[in-house]
Image: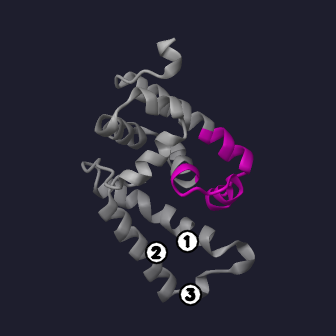
């Protein structure tokens, strides 16, 4: 969500500090602990994104490759560092609404139900947003110079 491993690590630390300082704020009857932690993360991320707006690097290559794997046609049309650079720009250019579902479902490998709990919406909404986000990513990558296998036919 932040585009920066350092910012993500800071947010992660803040999330666990918040849990350690206020353990009673977690209520198991409202949902599982991972959903609660992702909720805190979701609340802290926007401030971090605003403060590091100029830093657009996604330092974790493995996470970026997982998003590419979600649409194998895109892997065929982009190579190594060019693919990662294009993916970084496209992912960070997504509206937050769509970037959240890509991060949760494609990078964090959450189920639609778990992501729905975190984002406080239905699993159908998650599926819809993820479909739309992948289409936007595909369009952005094509606009950046990549061509999908469909375009090559």
The 10 Å Cα crowd at callout 1, few under 14, some 14 to 19, many 20 or more, is some
Which residue, given by chain and number where applicable, does mark 2 sit on? 15
In the rendered structure, does residue 116 fall within the stretch colored magenta? yes
Above or below, 127 against 35 in this view is above
Q: Give the percent coordinates (x, y) of residue 68.
A: 47, 40
Q: Identify the image quadrant of residue 10.
A: bottom left
Q: Position of residue 83 (x, y in %)?
A: 35, 36
The residue positioned 52% from the left and 34% from the top of the image is: 72
72 falls in the magenta region: no
Residue position marked by numbered label 3 in the rendering: 23
- Tell whether 30 sits left or right of 13: right
Q: Are marks 1 and 2 in contact (CB under 8 Å)?
A: yes
Residue farthest toward the top in the current orientation of the protein = 153
In the current view of this chain or complex, which residue is farthest to the left?
Answer: 54
**Disc 1 vs disc 3: which is toward the camera?**
1
Badge 1 marks a residue whose secondary structure is helix
Left-right relation of 8 to 43: left
124 horizontally vs 103: left or right: right
Q: Which residues are magenta?
A: 105-130
Q: Earlier in the sequence, mark 3 or mark 2?
A: 2
Q: What is the x, y in percent for residue 144?
A: 35, 25
Q: Residue at x 62, y 61 (%)?
A: 118
| Quarter where residue 17 is shown | bottom left
């Amino acid at each position: 969500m932040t585009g920066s491993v350092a910012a993500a690590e800071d947010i992660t630390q803040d999330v666990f500090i918040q849990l350690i300082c206020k353990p009673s704020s977690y209520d198991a009857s409202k949902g599982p602990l991972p959903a609660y932690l992702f909720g805190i993360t979701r609340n802290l991320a926007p401030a971090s994104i605003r403060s590091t707006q100029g830093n657009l690097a996604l330092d974790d290559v493995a996470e970026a490759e997982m998003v590419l794997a979600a649409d194998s046609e895109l892997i065929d049309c982009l190579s190594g560092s060019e693919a990662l650079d294009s993916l970084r720009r496209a992912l960070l250019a997504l509206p937050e609404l769509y970037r959240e579902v890509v991060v949760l479902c494609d990078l964090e490998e959450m189920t639609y139900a778990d992501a729905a709990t975190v984002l406080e919406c239905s699993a159908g909404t998650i599926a819809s947003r993820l479909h739309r986000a992948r289409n936007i990513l595909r369009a952005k990558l094509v606009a950046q110079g990549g061509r999908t296998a469909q375009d090559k036919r």
